[in-house]
Image (cartoon, coloured by chain):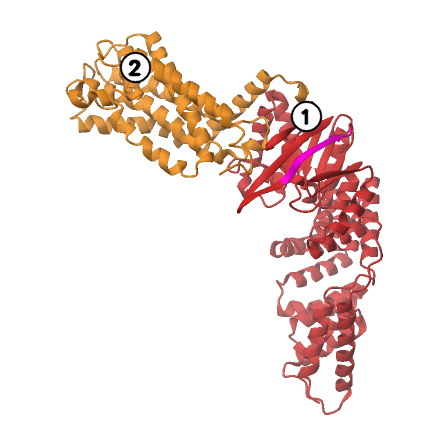
Chain colours: A orange, B red
C-alpha cells in the first residue's frame, strides 16, 4: 500500500466510490434476498396493474407498442429517476457515520448510489424486455446508440436534480417532506402510461415543458421500431439536461462544505 | 508540520453565535506526540475534527502535508446497521487496500479490538466503548502520520489500554498521536507535550506536568470533575498538594462514635427490649462494625443474629465471608452448610462452596459450582477471582489470566485483584505486564490508605443512629 499521504486524488476517488458502491450493494441486496426481488417486483407491479387497467395484457397497442412494453419502457426509467432523487435528499443526514472518514464526500455517496441504481435497473430491463418478447408481445428493437444517448441525457438530468436535492436536504429542514410531495405529480405527467399524442392539443404545450416526458418518448422511439414521437425534441432534452447538470454541479460545488460542516446555518 | 492560520470556528446557538476559535494562529512542533487538554466545550474535540478534515472552519485554514486518521472517539463512527466486520472492510476499501491485505487486516482488527464474536454483529448492538475499541483497532491497520485520539483510550479496561499502548508504540517509528483526554494518566503515558485549549486560544507546554498544573486551577466549572482529576492524578503518580480531610467526614466520625457508645451502653443493661426483629438488628449492627473495620465485634453480632433466627441467610453468608477472609475452614464449612440448607442456589453460597471444594482440592467440583455461580452473576469479581484460582490449580494459566482480567475489570479499585493478576502473569512468563499490575496494586493500596476516607461513612453513621433509636431500655 502506498503511504496514505502519497495517494493521488484519482486513486482516492476510485477507492472511495468503489468502497461505497460495495456498501450500497450490500445495503440494498445483502441482508435479505428480497432486495433483489423487490428491485424486480416494483416495476413489474406497475406494469401489471397498468396493463390490467388498460384492458388485459393483450389490449390494443398504444402508439404502435403492446401496452406492457409501453408501460415497462416508461416505468423503469422513471423508477430510476425517482429512487435516485429521493435518496439524494437524505444522502447527507443518513450517512453521517461515513463522513467520519475525511475522504468521503457527499458527492461520493451520491455517485455510489447512482451506480447501484443504474446497474440494478439495467439488470431489470435486460430481464423484462426479452421476457415480454418470449410472451409473444410484438415489438422490435431499434438503435442501441440512440438508446444510450437518451440514457446519458436522462442520467445527466437526474444527476443535476439529485445534486441539488443533496444540498437542499441538509440546508432546508422541510425538504424531506416537501420535495417528495412535489415529485409525486411527475408520475402522472411524464408519459409513463400515455403517449404525447393522446394529450389534448389545448394543454399539450404545457405538458411539453416537462423534460422527463421528452426523455421517455425519445427513449421509446430510440428503443423500438415503429414508435414515432413527433413532438418530443432532442434539442429540448439536451439543453434541459445540460443546464440542470451544470446547475447541479455548481450548487454542489458552492455548498459542499456548508452541508457537512457543523454549526452551519440550519 | 501543522500550521494553523487565522482559524475561526463558531456554532449557532440560541440568539447568536458561539465562537470556539477566533482568528487563531499557531504552529505545532514537528515530530511530537501532542496532548490536548482544556475545559469541556473549550474546543478540544472540534479542533481534532478540523484537523481530521471532517469538519470545516468558518474561515482560515489548517495547513499540513501529513495524513491524519479520522478522530478515534468513543462511538467509533460506524454505519450502525452494518456489522463491525462489514464496517471495517468498507473502511479498508475506502483507503484502497487490496483484497488479500484486507482479509489479513480484518483478523488483526478483530484480535486487537478484543470484542470477540461481537465483531460479526451489527454495530447498533454494541455496548458503549465497543465501537471505540473497534475504531481504534481499525485505525491501526493504516500508516497515518498522525493518529487523532479523542478519549478513546479511556474506554478500555487495563487490558485494552495496554494493547493500545503497545500498538501505538509499534507505530511510533513513523506515526505520532494527537490526543484529547480527561485522563491525565493517559496523556502522560502517550504524549511528549501538551496544548491547553481554552478561551479560544492555544498555549503550548513542553512538559505534561506543567500543562496539568496550569489547567487544573482554571477548571473549576464543576467541582466533581476536579475531584475526579485529582483522584486520577493521585493514582497516576502526579504530584499534588496533600488533600485535607473534609469537615463533613470528621462530623460523621463524631456521630458514629456517639451512636456506638450509646448502643453498647444499652446492650449492657439487663432490662433491654430489642426491636421486634432481633436478627435483622444484629445483622445491621454487624454490617456497621464490618464497615468500621472491627471484625471481632462484627462476627459476634452475626452469631447473635443467627442465635435469634437460625434461618437468617444474610448473617450466615456474612459469617462465611468473614471465615473465608480469616482462612478459618472449619467456621466456613459450618456457615456454608447452614446457608446451603436455606438457599442452595444462592450465588454467594455457591461461591463459598466453591472455595471449600478448592481448599479440599476438588477442582472439578469447584469449577462446576463456579459455572453455576457465573450463570447467575456474570459480573461478580469475586466469582471470577475464584475461577482464576481454580484454573490455576489445574494448570490452565492462560484461562486463569483471562478470568482474573475479568475480575479486575469488574472491580477496578481493588488492589488484591491486581496483586493476584500480577502473580498469574509472572507464572506465565509475562514479566513486564506483571510488573505493571503489581505497581498498579501498590498505587491503589496507597490511594485507599486512611487519608482517603470511605464514602460509606455517612451511611454507617445514619444506620447506627437508627439502630440506637430502635432500642428501648
Q: Chain of mark 2?
A: A
Where residue B285 sits, quadrant-wise, is bottom right
Mark nearer the viewer, 2 or 1: 1
Q: Is residue B323 above or below residue A243?
A: below
Q: Quadrant for the C terminus of chain B, please.
A: bottom right
Q: Is residue A105 magenta?
A: no
Q: Secondary structure at mark 1?
A: strand
Mark 1 neighbour class, 10 Å CA radius: few under 14, some 14 to 19, many 20 or more: few
Tell which of B7 and B204 is nearer to you: B7
Say left or right for B32 vs A259.
right
Numbered label attached to residue B266:
none
Q: Secondary structure at mark 2?
A: helix
Where residue A212 sits, quadrant-wise, is top left
Say left or right for B91 vs B398.
left
Tell which of B60 and B189 is nearer to you: B60
The picture places residue A38, in percent across and down from the top left corner, at: 36, 30
Q: Are marks 2 and 1 on the same chain?
A: no
Residue at 67% over, 31% down = B6
Residue at 39% over, 16% down = A242
The residue labelled by disc 2 is A219
Looking at the image, can residue B177 be seen?
yes
The picture places residue B30, in percent across and down from the top left corner, at: 78, 27
Mark 2 neighbour class, 10 Å CA radius: few under 14, some 14 to 19, many 20 or more: many
Q: Which residues are magenta?
A: B20-29
Where residue B205 sits, quadrant-wise, is top right
Main SS of the magenta part reads strand
The residue labelled by disc 1 is B63
- The alpha-carbon separation of the residues under discs 2 and 1 comes to 50 Å
Q: Is residue B24 magenta?
A: yes
Amino acid at each position: 500500500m502506498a503511504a496514505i499521504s502519497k495517494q493521488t486524488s484519482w486513486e482516492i476517488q476510485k477507492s472511495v466510490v468503489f468502497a461505497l458502491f460495495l456498501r450500497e450493494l450490500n445495503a440494498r441486496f445483502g441482508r435479505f434476498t428480497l432486495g433483489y426481488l423487490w428491485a424486480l417486483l416494483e416495476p413489474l407491479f406497475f406494469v401489471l396493474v397498468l396493463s390490467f387497467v388498460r384492458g388485459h395484457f393483450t389490449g390494443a397497442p398504444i402508439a404502435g407498442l403492446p401496452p406492457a412494453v409501453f408501460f415497462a419502457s416508461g416505468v423503469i426509467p422513471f423508477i430510476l429517476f425517482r429512487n435516485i432523487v429521493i435518496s439524494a435528499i437524505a444522502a447527507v443526514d443518513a450517512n453521517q457515520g461515513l463522513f467520519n472518514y475525511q475522504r468521503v464526500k457527499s458527492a461520493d455517496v451520491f455517485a455510489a448510489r447512482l451506480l447501484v441504481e443504474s446497474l440494478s435497473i439495467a439488470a431489470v430491463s435486460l430481464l423484462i424486455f426479452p421476457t415480454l418478447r418470449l410472451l409473444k408481445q410484438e415489438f422490435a428493437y431499434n438503435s442501441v446508440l440512440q438508446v444510450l444517448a437518451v440514457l446519458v441525457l436522462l442520467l445527466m438530468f437526474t444527476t443535476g436534480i439529485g445534486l441539488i436535492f443533496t444540498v437542499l436536504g441538509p440546508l432546508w429542514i422541510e425538504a424531506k417532506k416537501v420535495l417528495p410531495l412535489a415529485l409525486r405529480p411527475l408520475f402522472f405527467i411524464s408519459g409513463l402510461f400515455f403517449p404525447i399524442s393522446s394529450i389534448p392539443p389545448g394543454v399539450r404545450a404545457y405538458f411539453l415543458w416537462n423534460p422527463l416526458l421528452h426523455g421517455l418518448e425519445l427513449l421509446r422511439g430510440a428503443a423500438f421500431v415503429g414508435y414515432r414521437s413527433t413532438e418530443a425534441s432532442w434539442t429540448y432534452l439536451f439543453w434541459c439536461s445540460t443546464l440542470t447538470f451544470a446547475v447541479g454541479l455548481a450548487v454542489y460545488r458552492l455548498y459542499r462544505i456548508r452541508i457537512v460542516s457543523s454549526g452551519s446555518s440550519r | 508540520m501543522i500550521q494553523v492560520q487565522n482559524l475561526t470556528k463558531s456554532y449557532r446557538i440560541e440568539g447568536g453565535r458561539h465562537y470556539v476559535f477566533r482568528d487563531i494562529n499557531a504552529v505545532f512542533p514537528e515530530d511530537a506526540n501532542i496532548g490536548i487538554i482544556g475545559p469541556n466545550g473549550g474546543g478540544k474535540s472540534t479542533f481534532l475534527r478540523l484537523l481530521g478534515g471532517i469538519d470545516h472552519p468558518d474561515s482560515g485554514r489548517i495547513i499540513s502535508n501529513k495524513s491524519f486518521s479520522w478522530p478515534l472517539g468513543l462511538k467509533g463512527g460506524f454505519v450502525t446497521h452494518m456489522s463491525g466486520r462489514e464496517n471495517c472492510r468498507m473502511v479498508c476499501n475506502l483507503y484502497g487496500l487490496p483484497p488479500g491485505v484486507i482479509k489479513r487486516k480484518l483478523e488483526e482488527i478483530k484480535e486487537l479490538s478484543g470484542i470477540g464474536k461481537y465483531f460479526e454483529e451489527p454495530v447498533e448492538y454494541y455496548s458503549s466503548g465497543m465501537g471505540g475499541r473497534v475504531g481504534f483497532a481499525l485505525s491501526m491497520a493504516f500508516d497515518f502520520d498522525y493518529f487523532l485520539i479523542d478519549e478513546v483510550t479511556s474506554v478500555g479496561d487495563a487490558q485494552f489500554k495496554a494493547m493500545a499502548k503497545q500498538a501505538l508504540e509499534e507505530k511510533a517509528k513513523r506515526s505520532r498521536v494527537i490526543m484529547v483526554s480527561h485522563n491525565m494518566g493517559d496523556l502522560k503515558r502517550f504524549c511528549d507535550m501538551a496544548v491547553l485549549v481554552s478561551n479560544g486560544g492555544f498555549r503550548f507546554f513542553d512538559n505534561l506536568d506543567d500543562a496539568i498544573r496550569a489547567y487544573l486551577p482554571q477548571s473549576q466549572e464543576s467541582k466533581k470533575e476536579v475531584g475526579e482529576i485529582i483522584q486520577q492524578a493521585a493514582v497516576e503518580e502526579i504530584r499534588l498538594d496533600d488533600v485535607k480531610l473534609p469537615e463533613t467526614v470528621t462530623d460523621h466520625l463524631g456521630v458514629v462514635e456517639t451512636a456506638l457508645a450509646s448502643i453498647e451502653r444499652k446492650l449492657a443493661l439487663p432490662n433491654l427490649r430489642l426491636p421486634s426483629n432481633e436478627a435483622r438488628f444484629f445483622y445491621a449492627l454487624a454490617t456497621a462494625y464490618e464497615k468500621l473495620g472491627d471484625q471481632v465485634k462484627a462476627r459476634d453480632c452475626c452469631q447473635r443474629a443467627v442465635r435469634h433466627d437460625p434461618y437468617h441467610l444474610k448473617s450466615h453468608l456474612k459469617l462465611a465471608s468473614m471465615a473465608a477472609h480469616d482462612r478459618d475452614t472449619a467456621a466456613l464449612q459450618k456457615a456454608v452448610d447452614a446457608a446451603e440448607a436455606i438457599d442452595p442456589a444462592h450465588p454467594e453460597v455457591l461461591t463459598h462452596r466453591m472455595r471449600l471444594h478448592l481448599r479440599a482440592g476438588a477442582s472439578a467440583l469447584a469449577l462446576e459450582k463456579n459455572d453455576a455461580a457465573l450463570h447467575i452473576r456474570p459480573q461478580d469479581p469475586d466469582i471470577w477471582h475464584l475461577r482464576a484460582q481454580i484454573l490455576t490449580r489445574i494448570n490452565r494459566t492462560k484461562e486463569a489470566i483471562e478470568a482474573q482480567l475479568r475480575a479486575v475489570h469488574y472491580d477496578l479499585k481493588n488492589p488484591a485483584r491486581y496483586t493476584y493478576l500480577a502473580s498469574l502473569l509472572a507464572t506465565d512468563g509475562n514479566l513486564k505486564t506483571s510488573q505493571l499490575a503489581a505497581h498498579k496494586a501498590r498505587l491503589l493500596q496507597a490511594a485507599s490508605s486512611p487519608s482517603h476516607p470511605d464514602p460509606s461513612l455517612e451511611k454507617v453513621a445514619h444506620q447506627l443512629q437508627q439502630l440506637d433509636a430502635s432500642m428501648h431500655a
